[in-house]
Amino acid sequence: MILRLDRTKVNQLNLITLKQNTYGLKGEITVPGDKSISHRSIMFGSIAKGKTRVTNFLLGDDCLSTISCFRKLGVLIEQNEEEVVIHGKGTEGLQEPKEILDVGNSGTTIRLLAGILSGLHFHSTLIGDSSIGKRPMTRVVTPLREMGAKIDGREDGKYTPLSVRGGDLQSITYRLPVASAQVKSAILFAGLNADGVTKVIEPVATRDHTERMIERFGGEISRQGNEIYVTGGQKLTGTDIHVPGDISSAAFFLVAGCIVPNSYITLKNVGLNPTRTGILEVLQNMGATMEFQKNDADIFEPTATITVSTSDLKGTTIGGNIIPKLIDEIPIIALLATQADGVTIIKDAHELKVKETNRIDTVVSELKKLGADIQATDDGMIIKGGKKLTGAKVDSHGDHRIGMMLAIASQICEGELILENANAIAVSYPSFFLHLNNLAV
Ligand SMILES: O=C(O)C1=C[C@@H](OP(=O)(O)O)[C@@H](O)[C@H](O)C1
Ligand SMILES: C=C(OP(=O)(O)O)C(=O)O
């Protein structure tokens, strides 16, 4: 018997043993809800007035942290497997929390929440896990202080815990020093509570889910080139949100479909917001065989069904303006590149160093253990493709995207791959192993 996925060996150390797939991955999966959009649905639902009903909400650890924070801020949020219902009372309905707000592993939660809290006349303390404790907060603290919030934290607000005392905010014009949707969104949330028009200038366009949601909740926001304008004092109204599937989660199976021999995978409900589709451009440039069936009905956030099959791939260069459109997909793109003909260069991706782990270091160190020819550079990596990978003991380092990349790698590795700290995957894709199992049989 060839056991492709052996979950019986999971132990308390969270060690999982995975085996090569020699039959191919075949079948259909429905991609779980988008993490960025799920977070924002809770945030906007909480600051809007009235009921917001969210379907296909991602029940991943990060989004559950967002729910928990808003409950501590006094918002009534009902949640079951089918839907999340938020009973918003407007920003004035949010109350000073009696407990510390714990964002767990979620950078999106802490940075966007800091923006919301900045405009509220009370004190709160925000903490997260050890990974959050190493991630830079100055990028949101600086503009929010400039708008009038009193924020402090370790090393003058560089790191958590953060303490926020919100107040009356002034609008600002702010040129983002890094292309970051989290920083943009934090300022836009604060801007909704500020006096006057807040203008954010992006160096490169980043995901625009916050802007789309302001409109969805009945607010106004405008964009001219890379400048975004929002007026303070707007009243938002609760609405229904159907969260599209997360292209960042789909990416693992798009790549698996290309690199595991004899595969043919259909991915339903893939979010196709143009600020997120860099992975599809890369797959196309590298020669992936994909078919698209767009869903016409989705105006709020477009979606499609994508079919992918085993492909002959060639190396490519990835850098410049595309980086924010695929920043979270770089770990799995690195694995893809190990199976392509020729060299792949990933550049302009310094931001990888400040994610859940330093993703330049963790991708390179873990793929090297499997025998990949991969070198770290200051702003990315260089991968020489066409090398056969061999199973080894590898570690997610508590980073969900590294964990999933390594689990997909196991499918093409000769011999067993042992994955340490596999539980991190629940941060963004709790049904990941279920889906992998379903495609493997
Ligand atoms: O706004 C968001 O939902 C996110 C923005 C990105 O981070 P940055 O804003 O730090 O680039 C991305 O990496 C993260 O997973 C989610
Ligand atoms: C970087 C990520 O998320 P966050 O910044 O919200 O922790 C991610 O999901 O890859």
Image: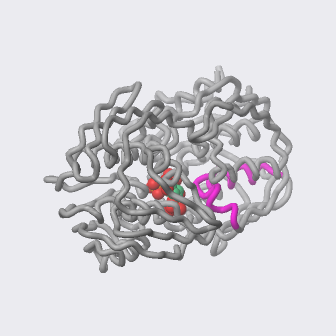
Q: Position of residue 182 (x, y in %)?
A: 47, 61
Q: Nearer the viewer, residue 77 or 31?
A: 77
Q: Nearer the viewer, residue 204 or 23?
A: 204
**Residue lying at 61% horizontally and 34% vertically, measured from the top left:** 298
**Residue lying at 29% horizontally and 64% vertically, measured from the top left:** 119
Q: Position of residue 254 (x, y in %)?
A: 69, 39
Q: Quadrant of residue 67?
A: top left
* Residue 322 is inside the magenta segment: yes
Query: Which colour scheme appears in the figure?
Result: one colour
**Residue lying at 58% horizontally and 26% vertically, measured from the top left:** 437
Q: Nearer the viewer, residue 246 or 252?
A: 246
Q: Against 411, is 389 above or below?
A: below
Q: Position of residue 379 (x, y in %)?
A: 64, 72
Q: Nearer the viewer, residue 395 or 206?
A: 206
Which residues make up the magenta segment?
321-340
86 left or right of 379 in image: left
Q: Quadrant of the N terminus?
A: top right
Q: Against 271, is 130 above or below?
A: below
Q: Main secondary structure of the magenta part?
A: helix
Q: How many marks?
A: 0
**Residue lying at 71% horizontally and 56% vertically, measured from the top left:** 372
Q: Position of residue 436 (x, y in %)?
A: 59, 31
The reply to whether residue 132 is visible in this rendering is no
Q: Residue furthest left?
A: 98
Q: Against 321, is 62 above or below?
A: above
Q: Quadrant of the C terminus?
A: top right
The reply to whether residue 244 is visible in this rendering is yes
